[in-house]
Image: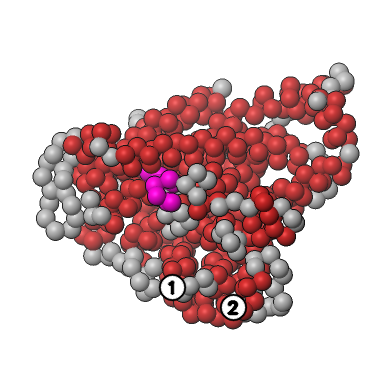
Amino acid sequence: MRRWKRSAQLVMFLLPAIIIVAVFVYVFLGWSLWLSLTDWKGLGGTGEFVGLKNYIKMFTNDRIFIKSLKNTLVLSGIFIGVTIPLGLFNAILLDMGLRGRRLFRLIYLMPLSFSFVVSATMWLWMYAPESGAINTLLRMIGLGSLAQPWITASSQSIPSLAIIYIWQFSGFATLVYYAGIARVPQQLIEAALVDGASTFRKYISIIIPLQRPATITTVVLLLMYSLRVFDLVWLTTGGGPGYSSQILSTYMWRVTFNRNQFAYGAAIGIFMFLLSMVILIPFLTLVRRGEEA
Amino acid sequence: MRLFINRLVKHKYFIYIILLGLSFFYLFPIYAMVNTSLKDTPELAYGPIQLAKGFNLSAYGEAFQRIKQPYVNSAIMAVSATVLSSFIGAMSGYVLSRYRFRGSSIVFFLIIIGFYVAPQSILIPLVRFMGMLGIYNTYFALILTHTAYGIPITTLLFKNYFDPIPTALVESAQIDGCSVIGVFTKIMLPLALPGFAVVGIFQFTNIWNDYLYGLTLTQGVASQPVTVAVANLKGTTVAAWNVHMAGAFMSSIPVLVIYLFFLRLIIKGLLMGSVKE
């Protein structure tokens, strides 16, 4: 009897979370999947079942989708490829025990506090070709010839966006690595120093190899964000010029809410889900394995 | 190369130069925003770098008129959804941390996956669902949405928070005849108060900064969050950069204040959500 009561209480504690997540995540995913198999075009009426037609169209008859997929992957690649080493570099600098390191840590984390709407606003002003802050600064210090068109040029829009991502998230990577470095057992470092290891050796041979867990968890979170970020691109380039910086999240929104192709938008959404699972699950299993070890 | 680096790191000022150079990268956009927000329209012509002549708050007045209702909406939305998702996450995280039963790890896994699902994958059903509930275009829709999508991460954070608490405490209370609710309210909740601070701040900053759900689920200043209102400042008047920046900066103040005064809790939340302690 008491056992039964206990189980009932456990269920009561879990039920709100289970019901809400079941509806908002799993029912909605199934609903999206079902919509993606129809030709539903918006609020009036319901669509006809068309099977995989939307998915076939995505890959055979929609160059913008392919471009968006490519852009998403390139953007994520640049973003993570720079943020991880930069975060590690920052963390090592902060680890050198200089005075003021807490202030520097705060400064590096500062960009993370801003919404993507605010970062987009700031960086529009940074990148404006004529009156923007970067080009103005370059002209002020006599490097006017280095002024760039930034997000207004097709060839530069993706790298320019990557810089904003890096600006916003490298403080986070710094933080995780800083905590990771602090967890390296002090005896290991002391033993190496007794053996006459240089500062360079200390980091290269002892500290950095132990940062694998920190690297995996950071990569997972950065990947997750870079696959879903919408606001930052939507409010700076809007996917342009042309389609040069269109990514999956902005293209999904445009298709769905500007063109009312709801079923096709749902198909892109489901594709994004599959893509993130395919990319993230190997990393998540690495995280789990790290926990068990 | 190696010797060169070893020699360089011995000079503290060299490290300081790099630290300051990086600080410039992180702070320069913020400077450009705040500096521009303090200028009036004629002063804008001097460009974004030249220091504003004084504290000219005219841009703030204009921006405030346009974002004050959304500001209130955001406050209501973020506070309600933070409280709700934290409580629900505390309950589920507590049970999943303390009790092992058949399928408990699967339940945990299925909840956590929700954190990794991109909003775009569930966005269209979400809009339809809010329409069916009759709360589309109200901040109730946003409260419900942020509560729901906050639960996976609050569950994870609270489970990580409860895990290191010794089981002996719980067991002795159970022997004393405490029920699940009794253990939770008498032992765990008091211990969890610092956890609520960490999770609450983590949730509040995330929800306050959201744009996509606000853009999709609301229309017009009566219900939209401040992020959407700030984004809309851009299109209205030509090149009113000062007003746009003033609105952007004002919308950032609550989270900036949290970062400045509760950085320890922010850091704890970020690390708890990423690194398993």
* Pointer 2 local density, CA inside 10 Å: few below 14, some 14–19, many at least 20: some
Give x and y (percent) for residue A195. Answer: 86, 18
Q: In this view, does B231 lie to the left or right of A205?
A: left
Q: In this view, does B70 lie above or below B57?
A: above
Residue B57 visible somewhere in the drawing: yes
Q: Which residue is drawn at 52% across and 77% down?
A: B64
Give x and y (percent) for residue B189. Answer: 52, 52
**Mark 2 belongs to chain:** B
- Residue lying at the far top of the rendered structure: A195
Give x and y (percent) for residue B249. Answer: 58, 67
Give x and y (percent) for residue A74. Answer: 48, 36
Are labels 2 and 1 assigned to the same chain?
yes
Instruction: Please report the bounds of the magenta region as a residue range.
Output: A240-249
In the rendered image, the quadrant that contains the C terminus of chain B is top right
Between B170 and A248, the one nearer to me in the picture: A248
Main SS, magenta region, reads: loop
Residue on which the image places disc 1 = B236
Q: In this view, does A138 lie above or below A226?
A: below
- What is the CA distance from the residue labelled 2 to the residue labelled 1? 15 Å
Residue A102 visible somewhere in the drawing: no
* Pointer 1 local density, CA inside 10 Å: few below 14, some 14–19, many at least 20: few
The answer to whether residue A186 is magenta is no
Q: Residue at x 39, y 73 (%)?
A: B221
Q: Is residue A210 left or right of residue B87?
A: right
Residue on which the image places disc 2 = B41
**For residue A98, which quarter of the picture?**
top right
Q: Which residue is drawn at 25% across and 33% down?
A: A60
Q: Is label 1 in a helix, a strand or a loop? A: helix
